[in-house]
């Protein structure tokens, strides 16, 4: 059922004061950055999209759009987990005001698992609406210049997945455990489980590799492959005895076992599996000295050259060449901002293979003075990516699948824009903080002062 139009009308929780409860604005600091930021965000833009996701049929009312978007924003603005966010919301009146509450609440607004359902309900399209709302708010409060939306910097990074460092021995041992569990769950015939030998053999592989005894290490890995192959064939022979709704998972496990055995026997094979629960993880090498390989997905980021606001961010599975992703990256930025892209500053990884009409600026070609200045701003994006990984949650993705990668990347871009917007609001003078009427008042005062000085000099 659609959410209620006014969140104030929903049933209130236990009261701190029995007679009359004070409003949040009566005891919080109105100059706080979250209060100023909440007053400048265009919540109505997202509310229109959120209301369209529900029907008029009966049932429990959905949560208000401002509460949903506010919680997702706060999570990625302050780099909190779902559980920690709900705990902080109950004890922080500024979080509650940011989410649209008028009185202090003593109970959590929702279960932490509700955030999972909200992210799935929104999807990539809904989170792009959320990013558009933040950009509109930045334009309205003049933190972002509309002319700078046509001049972008584009770069790519790796968003690592929340998986252990993959090794053949550990993956084979996990696969052996899953095969044994599947056979025992469905009460199928199991000749031998290797529950005692399997973990011991995986330990031997690590010790042999540390001692540089590679022949012994390879022999132990072959032994693990033999055990996994036996269990896999046991499951294949008894596949007909498994219930129909469990057969797809069993077939996927058999396929993963085949893939692990093949990549253990042929280390130079291209098609590799790095995690059993995340089969779409890619191995990406970015040439870093401290981290040779990163296991996750590639993320393309487009931000303005002047202010550094993210106007486009999306994940690309399969580790594609950067030049092949530029057209899709600029297309997303154009859809979100409704502005034609004029110039794009990139690194040498984006040379060629793009069909965009925008001027692509990179070193290695003759550039004008203005283009050289724009190219110097490209290095700013490297620092922005570092902030998104250290101050935000771009460093590690805990959401499942390719859809989780796309959603997490967009939420990290939203959190980065909100941190920039919060920093902009903090540094505003007092007469610019609260209302645009102050600007009109002071501009009129300065105009009258100028007229007075002119008349005195005359």
Image (cartoon, rainbow, N blue to C red):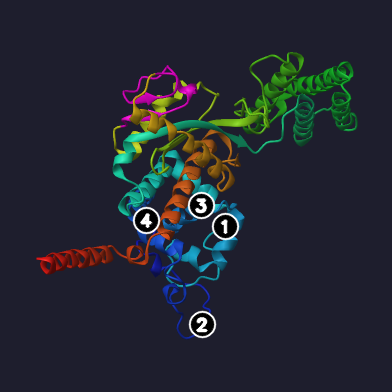
Q: Is residue 351 magenta?
A: yes
Q: Name the residue under label 2.
A: 17
| Label 1 SS | helix
Q: Which residue is drawn at 72% across and 18% down?
A: 263
Q: Going by the picture, which residue comes out furthest to the left?
A: 458
* Image mark for residue 423: none
Q: Nearer the viewer, residue 26 or 63?
A: 26
Cα–Cα span, label 1 and label 4: 20 Å
Please provide the residue range marked out in magenta: 341-365
Residue 402 relative to residue 252: left or right:
left
Using a 10 Å C-alpha cutoff, classify the residue at mark 2 as few (fewer than 14 neighbours), some (14 to 19) or many (20 or more): few
Cα–Cα span, label 1 and label 3: 11 Å
Cα–Cα span, label 1 and label 2: 25 Å
Tell me residue 358's x, y (percent). Answer: 32, 26
Q: Mark 4 points at which residue?
A: 41
Tell me residue 419's x, y (percent). Answer: 47, 51
Q: Mark 3 points at which residue?
A: 77
Q: Mark 1 points at which residue?
A: 85
Q: In which quarter of the image is residue 217?
A: top right
Cα–Cα span, label 4 and label 3: 14 Å
Q: Can you say which quadrant of the picture contains the C terminus?
A: bottom left
N-terminal of the pair, mark 1 or mark 4, is 4
Q: In which quarter of the image is residue 64?
A: bottom left
Cα–Cα span, label 3 and label 2: 32 Å
């Amino acid at each position: 059922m659609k959410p209620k139009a006014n969140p104030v009308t929903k049933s209130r929780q236990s009261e701190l004061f029995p007679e009359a409860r004070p409003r949040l604005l009566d005891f919080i600091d109105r100059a706080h950055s979250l209060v100023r930021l909440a007053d400048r965000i265009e919540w109505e833009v997202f509310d229109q999209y959120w209301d369209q996701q529900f029907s008029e049929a009966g049932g429990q009312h959905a949560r208000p759009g401002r509460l949903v978007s506010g919680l997702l924003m706060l999570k990625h603005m302050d780099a909190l987990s779902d559980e920690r966010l709900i705990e902080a919301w109950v004890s922080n009146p500024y979080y509650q005001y940011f989410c649209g509450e008028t009185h202090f609440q003593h109970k959590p607004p929702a279960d932490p698992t509700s955030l999972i359902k909200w992210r799935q309900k929104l999807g990539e399209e809904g989170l792009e609406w959320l990013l558009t709302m933040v950009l509109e708010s930045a334009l309205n409060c003049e933190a972002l210049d509309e002319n700078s939306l046509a001049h972008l910097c584009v770069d790519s990074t790796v968003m690592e997945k929340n998986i252990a460092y993959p090794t053949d021995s550990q993956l084979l041992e996990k696969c052996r455990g899953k095969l044994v569990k599947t056979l025992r769950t469905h009460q199928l015939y199991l000749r031998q489980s290797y529950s005692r030998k399997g973990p011991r053999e995986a330990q031997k592989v690590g010790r042999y590799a540390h001692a540089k005894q590679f022949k012994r290490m390879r022999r132990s890995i072959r032994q693990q492959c033999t055990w996994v192959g036996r269990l896999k064939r046991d499951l294949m022979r008894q596949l007909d005895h498994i219930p129909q709704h469990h057969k797809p998972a069993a077939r996927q496990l058999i396929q993963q076992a085949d893939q692990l055995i093949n990549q253990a026997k042929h280390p130079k094979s291209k098609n590799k599996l790095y995690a059993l629960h995340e089969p779409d993880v890619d191995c990406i090498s970015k040439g870093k000295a401290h981290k040779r390989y990163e296991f996750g997905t590639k993320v393309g980021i487009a931000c303005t050259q002047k202010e550094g606001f993210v106007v486009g961010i999306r994940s690309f599975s399969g580790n594609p060449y950067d030049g092949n992703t530029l057209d899709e990256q600029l297309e997303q930025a154009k859809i979100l901002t409704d502005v034609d892209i004029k110039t794009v500053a990139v690194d040498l990884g984006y040379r060629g293979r793009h069909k965009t009409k925008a001027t692509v600026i990179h070193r290695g070609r003759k550039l004008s003075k203005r283009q050289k200045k724009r190219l110097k701003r490209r290095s700013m994006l490297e620092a922005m990516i570092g902030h998104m990984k250290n101050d935000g949650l771009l460093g590690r993705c805990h959401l499942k699948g390719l859809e989780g990668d796309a959603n997490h990347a967009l939420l990290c871009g939203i959190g980065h824009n909100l941190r920039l917007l919060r920093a902009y609001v903090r540094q505003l003078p007092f007469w610019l903080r609260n209302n645009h009427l102050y600007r009109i008042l002071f501009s009129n005062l300065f105009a009258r002062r100028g007229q007075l000085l002119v008349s005195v000099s005359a």
